[in-house]
Image (cartoon, rainbow, N blue to C red):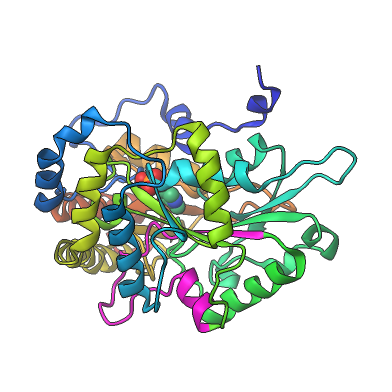
């Protein structure tokens, strides 16, 4: 058995199950889950219909690079969304079965462990989506964590990485809008990272699965390809971005996304994916084409999230340290007494609301766990359910902190 499997940590939801073991929530309250980032909005009818119309695709093995219609639909979406003059559907883009598997696979593509050489480093934002860490470990690399704290606006603190560490970096994971904070990287932050990549030769894997959930229709978050292009890096050297239909189109069960960017990386990724069976079913491709071509359902989706943030944030602001995010559908909220695990456990016991303690999403680095004292609250359920949960959280938090309004 691969001994590296023993280096993997329990997933945050497993830790949550452990925290809540043996607790029976008060049955007077209906359960409301805000722990998992699984969209609950209806799947768009156009994608459902396209899938049904393409059931004949189940009779064929699909090509790993995907058919021309999906590559064209994805490339055209990238061009429209990020004002890019051209994305070559044949060389710069590949469909993936949800961004999770591709974010895992990219480390297996990039990390090159050489006998007698220093162990490669993969930089990982802290807190982060835990798949990056597992991918780095199973590729044989050393994960090095880059803290994202309130002092830094929840952006990665690159200055915490020493020059000798930078020299060993082969891959950097970055997530914008970030999970859990929703922080969007600005152009100067991208520029600094691209400069480092040019100097040290590492690959940047930009996780953009929350790119389409944002508060202001006039200001969509900038993506990494857009920033690279604006900075004159028109070939996207060493840059690969990951997009998904899971959040944008509320299709987490479709398992559909893409990787795009540096043509050299995509070519090698195709080779890897030919062996690990990364091809997307033609039936799923058809549903995905319909979803990437349509923006109306995404605009509606954003409006649903906006209504929830507008209603929930003012309710919680008197009892938690909370602001609407720049992107994504999580609130990243501070607990007044700093004890996120007790808060999550007792809230569940008393009011049957499930949240994720922030410390479960981060690692302690230099004695600091940047998720400690924070809660990740996913506004994925209906407006009514989110409002009901917010009222219960407010009551609960007010009772814990004397002097706060209930
Ligand atoms: C930051 C981040 N990246 C990637 C994913 C994976 O999304 P999917 O595989 O559904 O595209 C998730 C899912 O929750 C996520 O939170």
Tell me, yes or no, whether the highlighted magenta stretch contains residue 191: no
**Which residue sits at x=55%, y=40%?**
272
Report x, y in % for residue 7: 67, 30
Range shown magenta:
203-230
Residue in the image at 25% along x and 31% along y: 26
Residue that extends furthest to the top in the rendered view of this protein: 1
User: In the picture, residue 349 is in which quadrant?
Assistant: top left
Task: Say left or right for 150 vs 38.
Answer: right
Residue 301, image quadrant: bottom left
| Residue 159 pos. (x, y %) | 73, 69
Report x, y in % for residue 236: 55, 69
Q: Quadrant of the C terminus?
A: bottom left
**Residue 366 seen from this side:** yes
Observer-nearest of 173 and 276: 276
Residue nearest the viewer, comparing 311 with 282: 282
Task: Report the number of discs.
Answer: 0
User: Could you tell me which residue is drawn at 21 percent across and 62 percent down?
Assistant: 293
Q: Is residue 187 above or below residue 388?
A: below
Residue at the far right in the pictured view = 116
Residue 317 seen: no
Asked if residue 364 lies left or right of residue 350, the reply is right
Image point 22% across, 65% down: which residue? 302
Which image quarter holds the N terminus? top right
Nearer to the camera, 130 or 2: 2
Place of residue 362 in the rendered image (x, y in percent of width and height, measured from the top left): 57, 48
- Does 328 sit above or below residue 53? below
Q: Is residue 205 magenta?
A: yes
Above or below: residue 164 compared with residue 195: above
């Amino acid at each position: 058995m691969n001994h590296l499997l023993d280096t993997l940590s329990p997933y945050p939801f497993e830790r949550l199950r452990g925290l809540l073991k043996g607790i029976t929530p008060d049955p007077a309250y209906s359960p409301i889950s805000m722990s998992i980032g699984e969209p609950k909005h209806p799947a768009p009818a156009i994608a459902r219909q396209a899938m049904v119309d393409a059931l004949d695709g189940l009779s064929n093995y699909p090509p790993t690079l995907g058919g021309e219609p999906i590559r064209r639909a994805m490339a055209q979406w990238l061009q429209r969304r990020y004002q890019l003059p051209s994305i070559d559907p044949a060389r710069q883009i590949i469909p993936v079965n949800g961004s999770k598997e591709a974010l895992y696979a990219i480390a297996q593509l990039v990390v090159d462990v050489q006998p007698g050489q220093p162990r490669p480093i993969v930089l990982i934002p802290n807190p982060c989506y835990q798949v990056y860490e597992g991918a780095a470990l199973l590729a044989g690399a050393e994960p090095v964590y880059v803290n994202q704290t309130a002092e830094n606006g929840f952006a990665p603190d690159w200055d915490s990485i020493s020059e000798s560490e930078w020299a060993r970096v082969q891959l950097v994971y970055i997530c914008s809008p970030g999970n859990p904070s929703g922080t969007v990287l600005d152009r100067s932050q991208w520029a600094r990272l691209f400069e480092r990549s040019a100097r040290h030769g590492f690959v940047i894997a930009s996780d953009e699965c929350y790119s389409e959930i944002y508060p202001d229709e006039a200001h969509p978050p900038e993506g990494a390809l857009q920033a690279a292009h604006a900075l004159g890096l028109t070939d996207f050297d060493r840059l690969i971005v990951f997009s998904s239909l899971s959040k944008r189109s509320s299709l987490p069960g479709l398992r559909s996304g893409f990787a795009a960017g540096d043509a050299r990386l995509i070519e090698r990724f195709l080779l890897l994916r030919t062996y690990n069976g990364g091809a997307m079913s033609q039936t799923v491709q058809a549903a995905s084409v319909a979803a990437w071509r349509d923006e109306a359902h995404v605009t509606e989706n954003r409006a649903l999230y906006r209504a929830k943030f507008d209603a929930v944030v003012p309710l919680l602001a008197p009892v938690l340290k909370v602001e609407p995010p720049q992107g994504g559908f999580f609130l990243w909220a501070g607990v007044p007494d700093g004890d996120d695990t007790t808060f999550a456990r007792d809230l569940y016991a008393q009011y049957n609301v499930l949240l994720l303690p922030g410390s479960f999403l981060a690692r302690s680095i230099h004695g600091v766990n940047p998720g400690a004292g924070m809660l990740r609250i996913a506004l994925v359920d209906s407006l009514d359910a989110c409002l009901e949960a917010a009222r219960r959280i407010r009551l609960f938090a007010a009772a814990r902190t004397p002097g706060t309004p209930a």
